[in-house]
C-alpha cells in the first residue's frame, strides 16, 4: 500500500488511516514524500552532480 505525504496535517491523517488499513490487510505500507527539488528542475538539469543528487536524497529522507 502506498500513501503520499507532504508534512501537512491532512497528509499525516492520511498516513494514520493508511497505517491502520495496512495493518488490517497485513500488507506493507510505503509512504511517499511529495516535494519539489530545491532550486527546481532547471537547477538539477543545468548542473548535474552525483553529490547534489545524494544531498537531495538525504533531504527527502530527513523530511519523510
Image (cartoon, helix red, strand yellow):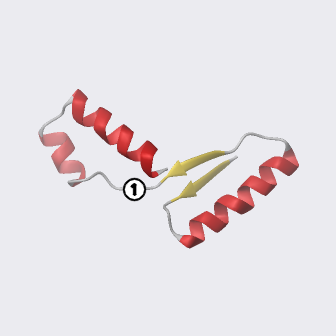
Judged from this view, the residue extending furthest toward the right is: 24
Give the percent coordinates (x, y) of residue 42.
17, 49
Residue at image coords 73%, 62%: 17
Specify few, some or many for label 1: CA neighbours under 10 Å numbering under 14, 14-19, or 20 or more.
few
Q: Quadrant of residue 44?
A: top left
Q: Secondary structure at mark 1?
A: loop
Up the image or down, 41 lies above or below 6; here it is above
Q: Which residue is mark 1?
A: 35
Residue at point 29% right, 51% down? 37
- The picture places residue 60, in percent across and down from the top left corner, at 41, 46
Give the quadrant of residue 21: bottom right
Q: Is residue 45 above or below residue 38?
A: above
Question: Could you tell me residue 59's position as x and y percent?
Answer: 36, 45
Residue furthest to the left in view is: 46
Total number of numbered labels? 1
| Residue 37 as seen in the image, left or right of residue 27 | left
Identify the residue at image location x=19%, y=31%.
49
- Residue situated furthest top in the rendering: 50
Q: Is residue 55 left or right of residue 6?
A: left
- Position of residue 38 in the picture relative to residue 27 (left or right): left
Which residue extends farthest front?
A: 62
> In the rendering, at what x and y percent does residue 56 appear?
32, 41
Q: 62 or 11, which lies in front?
A: 62
Along the horizontal axis of the image, is 32 left or right of 55? right
Residue at screen point 16% across, 47% down: 43
Amino acid at each position: 500500500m502506498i500513501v503520499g505525504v507532504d508534512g501537512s496535517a491532512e497528509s499525516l491523517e492520511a498516513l494514520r488511516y493508511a497505517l491502520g488499513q495496512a495493518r488490517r490487510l497485513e500488507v506493507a505500507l510505503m509512504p511517499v514524500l511529495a516535494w519539489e527539488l530545491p532550486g527546481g528542475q532547471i537547477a538539477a538539469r543545468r548542473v548535474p552532480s552525483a553529490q547534489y543528487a545524494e544531498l537531495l536524497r538525504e533531504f527527502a529522507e530527513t523530511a519523510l
